Image (cartoon, helix red, strand yellow):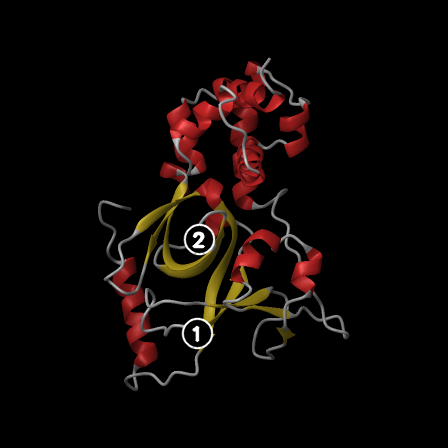
Amino acid sequence: MKSNFARYIRSLRNDSGLTQTELADALGIKRSTVNNYENEVAQPSIENVLLFARYFNVTTDALLLGTVELSSETASPNKECAEHDFISGSKLRVLVSTVSPDNKDNIELVSVRARAGYTAGYKDPEFIQSLPTFQLPFLEKERKYRMFQIDGESMLPIPDRSYVIGEFVQDWHTIKDGHAYVFVTQDEGLVFKVAFNQLRKKKNFLLRSLNKDYAPFELPLAQVAEIWRFVNYTSSELPSQENGISMLLEKLEDISNKVDKFA
């Protein structure tokens, strides 16, 4: 007898009118993985159970224990509404945060060492409370900020090991083409890139680097956990020229004007 998970993901997929390939593409996994789950050739990881649950707007308990309501009459419209709610964050976008003793929002620091832990623990209050915190008086008080340390040279002229300040994005429909964001993802960890919003057409984001040596790639919606809009950065490395910030802005503008076959 098939497990509850195998039975219900097959039923949810069929009710939504999706092929295994279409579902796999939407989740950012292989078609063979979906096939193996449906036929009980393989058991899903916790991360992949969460992917299916988020996509179909059901709880993990519902998938694993067999309490999903299967109805072909309501699956399609419910799925469309659920997807909108997920992207807009009207029901599902939950942010774990900390406050200072005087009840002000902290800016939590996610260093390179803490990045792997953050991918798994961004919803864990204990993990978030373990991060270093600080305050910056020039940021808007009513918005939520977090600082992430980046690594690598894909976003030059922003140097390796810089600290990027991001503003929490609640509604992913507001992601603007050609603007930089930090994406917290299921498989890639923390990704700092210039984004192009392809949610309506492809259910993904096209991500580009400032450094042209790095190829653009598409990030499926189902892989995204959090998004933070780039606000500022700090680095101990001196810029190679006085107009470093100007060069950064020029690169961002240049990328935003190049919507090629990937967009």
Q: Residues within 10 Å of mark 2 (few under 14, many from 20)?
A: many
Tell me the quarter of the image containing the N terminus: top right
Q: Is residue 14 left or right of residue 5?
A: left
Q: Residue 77, relative to residue 90: is it above or below?
A: above
The x and y percentages for residue 246 are 31, 77
Q: Is residue 61 left or right of residue 57?
A: right
Q: Is residue 243 left or right of residue 126?
A: left
Is the C-beta separation of discs 1 and 2 under 8 Å? no
Label placed on residue 162: 1
Q: Where is mark 2, residue-wise? A: 175
Q: Nearer the viewer, residue 32 or 41?
A: 41
Q: Residue at x 30, y 58 (%)?
A: 256
Residue 97 visible in the current orientation: no
Q: Residue 86, relative to residue 115: is it above or below?
A: above
The x and y percentages for residue 167 are 53, 63
Q: Residue at x 63, y 54 (%)?
A: 95
Q: Earlier in the sequence, mark 1 or mark 2?
A: 1
